[in-house]
Image (cartoon, rainbow, N blue to C red):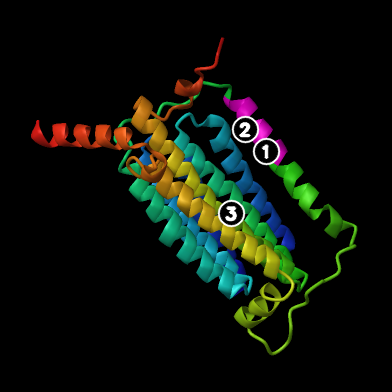
């Protein structure tokens, strides 16, 4: 019953799959952002596990930068969403196809 | 033994929470489930001995990102049920699984060929926070500073986008335009 690297990689795969299902399925932009957070987090788990089992700190460093990027993405993304919602009153992806010929 | 129990417990909880996030129709349920999932993920970091990363996960994700989403949701109509794309379910699940397996294979391919050499090995007798600080402020100093600048830019962008009339600059406008804005303001106050 020893927990190895493979266990963590399988868990990371499952979480990444859930996040991808969310990205493909969702129409609401806010919930699409939630799905991308799941993707980033699943990759973070894989980085931390590899860092632990190989005794190397590089994985943890990458996880830090991923967290920093996620934080700034949320700030800019939410600002854009608020502007869009003020103009159009909804944040569905279907309402953003104004360039369709 | 203890580690195995903790791993399976938190794996089950995390998967359940994230499953709720992608399937629920209420945006509020998705938000709370996502916050719970983030805290459960930090448990994996503590199990793996990455204490600092676990603390950062709790502080940044559940403290900052989730709070930001909660404030952002006040602008949106979140009581309405979320409509979803009517696509073929099997294609979606199949493609997702395939893509996830591919990503993990790409990440783990160099490890299978056993070419991995520890660049910055974990030191003995030094805590996790200390060794992280040593590596972060020597080898990763420039990425660290760039990340700081990126966060500053993101903060300014968030303020300008979400604030009222933040896209106007009084110093770049002529006197008449400023007069016009003042007139509109007075009209609103009077009416």
Looking at the image, the residue that sits furthest to the bottom is B125
Cα gap from disc 3 to disc 1, whole angstroms = 25 Å
Where disc 3 sits, the SS reads helix
Q: Is residue B92 left or right of residue B30?
A: right
The magenta segment: B89-99
Q: Are discs 1 and 2 less than 8 Å apart at CB? A: yes
**Labels 3, 1: one chain:** no
Quadrant position of the N terminus of chain A in the picture: bottom right
Residue A1 seen in the current view: no
Residue A40 placement (x, y as % from top left): 60, 51
Where disc 1 sits, the SS reads helix
The answer to which of B116 and A86 lies nearer the viewer is A86
A77 relative to B113, above or below: above
The residue labelled by disc 3 is A69
Q: Residue at x 12, y 37 (%)?
A: B189
- Chain name for mark 3: A
Q: Is residue A28 left or right of residue A62?
A: left
Between disc 3 and disc 1, the foreground one is 3
The picture quadrant where one finds residue B186 is top left
The residue labelled by disc 2 is B93
Q: Which mark is residue B97?
A: 1
Residue B124 placement (x, y as % from top left): 73, 87
């Amino acid at each position: 019953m020893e927990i190895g690297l493979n266990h963590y990689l399988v868990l990371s795969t499952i979480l990444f799959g859930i996040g991808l299902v969310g990205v493909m399925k969702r129409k609401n932009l806010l919930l699409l952002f939630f799905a991308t957070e799941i993707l980033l987090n699943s990759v973070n788990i894989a980085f931390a596990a590899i860092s632990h089992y190989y005794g190397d700190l590089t994985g943890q460093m990458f996880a830090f930068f991923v967290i920093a990027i996620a934080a700034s993405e949320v700030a800019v993304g939410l600002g854009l969403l608020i502007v869009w919602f003020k103009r159009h009153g909804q944040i569905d992806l279907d309402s953003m196809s104004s360039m369709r010929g | 033994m203890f580690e195995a129990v903790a791993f399976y417990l938190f794996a089950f909880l995390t998967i359940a929470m994230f499953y709720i996030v992608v399937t629920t129709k209420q945006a509020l349920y998705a938000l709370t489930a996502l916050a719970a999932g983030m805290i459960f993920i930090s448990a994996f970091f503590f199990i793996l001995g990455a204490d600092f990363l676990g603390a950062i996960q709790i502080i940044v994700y559940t403290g900052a990102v989730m709070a930001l989403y909660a404030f952002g949701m006040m602008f949106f109509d979140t009581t309405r049920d979320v409509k979803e794309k009517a696509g073929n379910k099997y294609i979606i699940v199949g493609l997702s699984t395939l893509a996830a397996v591919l990503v993990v294979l790409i990440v783990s391919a160099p490890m299978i060929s056993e070419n991995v050499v520890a660049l910055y090995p974990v030191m003995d007798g030094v805590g996790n926070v200390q060794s992280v600080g040593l590596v972060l402020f020597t080898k990763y100093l420039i990425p660290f500073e760039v990340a700081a600048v990126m966060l500053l830019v993101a903060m300014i962008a968030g303020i300008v986008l979400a604030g009222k009339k933040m896209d106007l600059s009084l110093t770049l406008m002529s006197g008449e335009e400023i007069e016009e804005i003042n007139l509109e303001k007075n009209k609103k106050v009077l009416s």
